[in-house]
Amino acid sequence: MIVNMSKSKFSRRITWRVILIMSLFNVLIIGAVILFDLGMSRFESKTRAQHLIYGISGKLEAMVSTMEIAATNNVAEIENNLECPEKVQQALVHELQLNPFYIGCAVALEPDYYASQGRWYELYTSFSDSAHIEQKQIGSAQHDYFNQDWYQKGLNLEKGKGYLTALYLDKDGGKRIVSTYVKPIFDRQDRKVGVYGIDININWLENAIINEENKFKEIERLDNDPNNPDDDDVYFFIQIIDSKGRNIAGSKLIDDNILQTILKKDSIAFEKMTIGDINYSISSKRIANTDWTLVLAQHERFVLLHGYFLACVILFFMTIGGIVIFFFMRHSIRRTIRPLRYLSDSAHEVAHGNFDTPLPIFKHQDEITELRDSFDTMQQSLKQYVDDLKEATAAKASIESELKVAHKIQISMLPKKFPPFPTRKDIELYGMLTPAKAVGGDLYDFFINDDKLFFCIGDVSGKGVPASLVMAVTRTLFRNVVTHTVHPSEMVRIMNNDMSNGNDEMMFVTLFVGVLDLKTGHLSYCNAGHEAPYIGHSLLSCHSNLSIGLIPDRDYKGQETEIAHGTTIFIYTDGLTEAMNANKKPFGKDRVKEIVTALPPDICPQIMIETMAEAVHQYVGDTEQSDDLTMLAIKFV
């Protein structure tokens, strides 16, 4: 059951990892698409604004251009007949007959231009009904046109120029709200003598704006929040203003500060502005030959409406697609890793020692099949390895058993009974040998013959079984040569010749051999490359003879000295001085000297060796022993 849970976790881990990677890429893609959609939505709104701006302004400019042509022709006819008021009247009637969509047209002259007409002369021609035209002179003190805006605008124009005024209420002429296209009138002496004007009705402009705004009302309803019915934000509007910011057409929704910003520029392509705490994108254009400015404002929500809508559609379908892909991938991944479950079950059985567990067979030749083949090879290798391990374990057990026997044999070759001479009161001895392995290469030996103590201590190069064999040979040779000579130097010479013959492995032995006369305390000795022993608290002087076993037919120098009663001889191998602690630092000769000199001269040999052994043990701690350790103490009583 635990195995199945781990497998399902592995399947989920792969699934979620793949989904996470895909999700990250989808987020990046969706983000890029949404940004692109919003950018395109803004571009679309800008294009729409430009289209409407140029469409409406184009109609206005076309109307102004038409009036420009008509007014230019009519002004020329009037200027040619200024001397005859009757012909001026006929020119106005003729103009109105050609353009029945005009409200009326007028000629207003400078003060007292016609003396017979008085100070004011403004001849206004208009339709009394759809079929009749009436003319009347409306200039008077009550209708002082000299100070009216349309007259001042026209009078300030240059010759040939025209201008469409802002809306105003014409109480005496058209008797309605009109806009007047004015041009200056010049006499034959090229003097400016009056103003010509054509009154037009711009209700069509208001209707055009309303029609354009109505096209977007349904879109506005789509964007309104249904949970907020009080939301009365205007999302799209068109407004025409004059140079003073007065509204000409459309709803007056732009505050004065924004109006001043708009009027400072001839045109605005697409610029963000805040109107009543609402962000709008403003587009505007100044109408030629007028002081009118056409303004189009789009709510920021309206600008990005299509982008938001398309983004929602994309998010919806990508979410649905992601859910479908998730379940499809989870199913596919589980199906794909199913062979791994079979392999895992088989491997679990093999791990419990069932090496004959059959492995599943797969049809597809892919990495899982290669893994299965690798498992099969591993299974066969494990079986062979276990068989070999059993054989090796049995062989190792046999070797260990043999080494234990060898250890017992080696130890049995050395003196191990202490005190060794319990009936003698003139000598005390104690020895200790601790091999680094089951068997070692250190040796010590001693025996008494004719009141002489023959003793030796040695250290064979190397460790283990080879060293133990050389140690056994050395000990046997020592026992044999004693029967032929009592001189240590001769003993060492004979042992060296025997050890050197056939020594292809070049193994050698450091050896110290001594003969102590127990009656006189006379000590004769020979040192063959061994550590110098202590006599009491002092080191014994030793010649530097070569270790035995290397060069045959070599002479060895012997030495002699006298030992006082109560003196202890302490001999050891280099396993004592080279014992390492955890920091790889040796015990050293200085520590050996400190311990020897600190002990009383008449100390018991056993206590001396046990004290030295305890000091080494405390120094090395748990560090593994690296060399055989042998010590021998002889006290001459």
Image: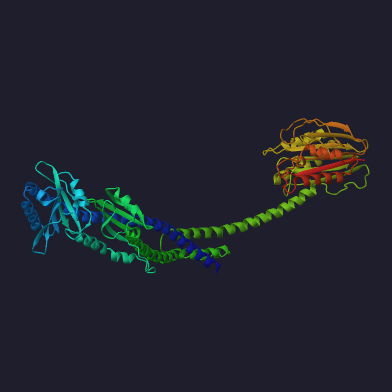
Considering the image in quadrants, where does the C terminus appear?
Answer: top right
Measuring 20% from the left and 48% from the top, which residue is drawn there?
152
Q: Is residue 160 above or below residue 36?
A: above
The answer to which image quadrant residue 45 occupies is bottom left
**Could you say which is closer to the camera, residue 342 or residue 202?**
202
**Could you say which is closer to the camera, residue 377 or residue 186?**
186
The spot of residue 474 in percent (x, y) is 76, 41
Q: Is residue 447 above or below residue 35?
A: above
The answer to which image quadrant residue 552 occupies is top right
Report whether residue 208 is seen.
yes
The spot of residue 532 in percent (x, y) is 80, 35
Report whether residue 481 is seen.
no
Measuring 17% from the left and 52% from the top, which residue is drawn there?
181
Q: How many labels were placed on the picture?
A: 0
- 282 relative to 566 in the view: left or right: left
Q: Is residue 305 above or below residue 587?
A: below
The spot of residue 230 in percent (x, y) is 37, 68
